[in-house]
Amino acid sequence: MRPLRLVLAEDHALLRAGLTQLLEAKGFEVLHAVDNLPALEQALTDPEADAAVVDVRMPPTFTDEGLRAAIAARTRRPGFPVLVLSQYVEQLYARELLASGEGAVGYLLKDRVSDVAEFVDALHRVADGGTVLDPSVVAAVLERRRDTPLERLTDREREVLGLMAEGRANAGIAQALVVTEKAVAKHINSIFTKLDLPADTDDHRRVRAVLAYLRV
């Protein structure tokens, strides 16, 4: 099986080189490692690319170029996996990135990524169609949301769903909430029922539940 082929966008030369070396050491192939918006836009048109790791703020204006390019790429290629790796939470564009409801999205803050294995696992999850979101991103996306179908959920079910949005597996959720994995599975099944998610693969329903949680 061939390695996942990536577009990497990071304007800081040392970090870009370090990420390239790290990703290739972990079995990925970096097709394009770019440092500005025009180069990123061109790289994202490569049909050989399987996914992208994108910084938010890039030349020329250092505002939201990377995130806007990622959104445009997913418009051209629905469901194209994108992992945003940034120092900032751009609330408006984060919501737009998630609004398509297609999954295959990650948004991690650089300061929180301290474990290489977790970063690599997050990238694999996104490439497989999942969602992996930093808690700060979840909080920003949910800000000021009221009166949604999620009102059916209990407080504990909301906690479980929030941890699912961070990309945690059942064991990780159980550890965070200090409950058993069996209790977590029960909560998740209840969440699926209350959100009217029909029987499907558990992984697919997890993504759909998270997207329902975050949808604008």
Image (cartoon, rainbow, N blue to C red):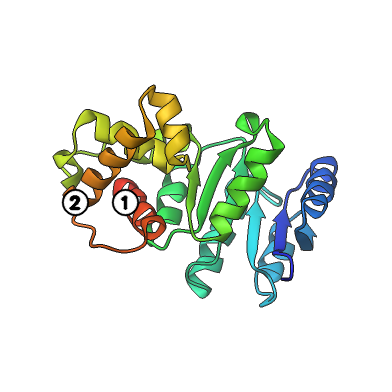
The quarter of the picture where residue 98 lies is bottom left
**Total marks drawn?**
2
- The answer to whether the residue labelled 2 contacts the one labelled 1, judged by CB atoms less than 8 Å apart, is no
Q: Is residue 107 above or below residue 163?
A: below
Q: Is residue 122 visible?
A: yes
At label 1, the amino acid type is: Ala
Q: Secondary structure at mark 2?
A: helix
- Give the residue at x 34% y 57%: 205
At label 2, the amino acid type is: Thr
**206 or 110, nearer to the observer:** 206
- Give the residue at x 65% y 42%: 119
Circle 2 Cα neighbour tier, 10 Å, few/some/many (<14 / 14–19 / ≥20): few
The outermost residue toward the top is 178
Residue 207: percent from left, percent from top: 39, 54
Q: Secondary structure at mark 1?
A: helix
- Give the residue at x 46% y 48%: 94
Q: CA distance from mark 2 to mark 1?
A: 10 Å
Q: Nearer the viewer, mark 2 or mark 1?
A: 2
Residue 35: percent from left, percent from top: 77, 53
The quarter of the picture where residue 116 lies is top right
| In the image: residue 49, left or right of residue 135 | right
Residue receiving disc 2: 193
Residue receiving disc 1: 209
Residue 6: percent from left, percent from top: 71, 62
| In the image: residue 171, left or right of residue 85 | left
The outermost residue toward the bottom is 47
